[in-house]
Image (cartoon, helix red, strand yellow):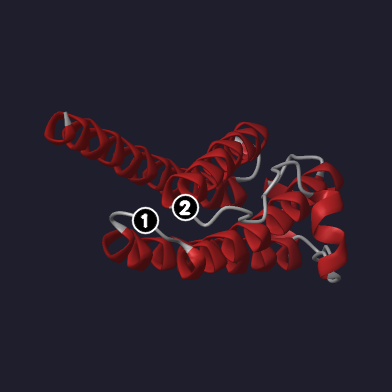
Amino acid sequence: MGKQAIKVASVDVDKLLEMLNAALSEEWLAYYQYWIGARLMEGPMRSEVEPELLLHADQELNHAVMVVDRIIQLGGTPVINPKEWTNWARCAYDEPADPYIEVILEQNLKGERCAIERYKEIADFTSGKDHTTHQMAVQILNEEVEHENDIEDWLADLERMKEEWKKIRF
């Protein structure tokens, strides 16, 4: 961390680095979950949802870049070994055991809600103490909220579609 940055930051840097490494691990897992889920997904609306999930994956990767850059700026070392990601991560990113679109979306929704909590904690921890990390956390938090909204909308659309099918079939 730069000398002036150290003077103006009044935060427990070791604790913050732990939080950021956990977030970094979760971003990598989220990236993979979106990426593989988009490719394996089956069911209605697949052609509409797949490119959006790949966009979400790219955004999760961008979050990882932002977090790793901040870890380095703070003088820390990012989690280097992918085997450690699940140890650091609080958010449980599940493998897509069932490729049906609703299952994939529910898994991603669970991950997004966990990420929202993670970045809220980082934003709260750094508020008024480390403006750079705080701004980064708020930016990522806003994107995670957008992801959650997208997924909730797709799930609602799927539910409406199922209800319409029931009306037609009976």
Q: Nearer the viewer, residue 74 or 50?
A: 50
Circles 1 and 2: CB atoms closer than 8 Å:
yes
Residue type at mark 2: give it: Tyr
- Residue tagged 2: 100
Q: Which circle's residue, 1 or 2, is located before the other in the chain?
A: 1
Which mark, by number, is residue 149? none
Distance between the Cα atoms at labels 1 and 2? Answer: 6 Å
Q: Position of residue 168 (x, y in %)?
A: 12, 35
Q: Seen in the image, is 21 located left or right of residue 157?
A: right
Residue at image x 61%, y 38%?
A: 114
Q: Residue furthest front?
A: 170
Q: Is residue 91 above or below residue 44?
A: above
Residue that appears at 75% across and 68% down: 72
What's the residue at 21%, 31% (across, down)? 166
- List the residue tagged with mark 1: 43
- Picture mark count: 2
Q: Is residue 96 shown above or below 105?
A: below
Compared with 28, 12 (above or below) is above
State the residue at coordinates (66%, 63%): 28
Q: Secondary structure at mark 2?
A: loop
Q: Residues within 10 Å of mark 1 (few under 14, many from 20)?
A: few
Q: Could you tell me residue 101's position as x and y percent? A: 43, 52
- Residue 129 locus on image (x, y percent): 65, 38
Q: Position of residue 62 (x, y in %)?
A: 52, 67
Amino acid at the residue labelled 1: Gly
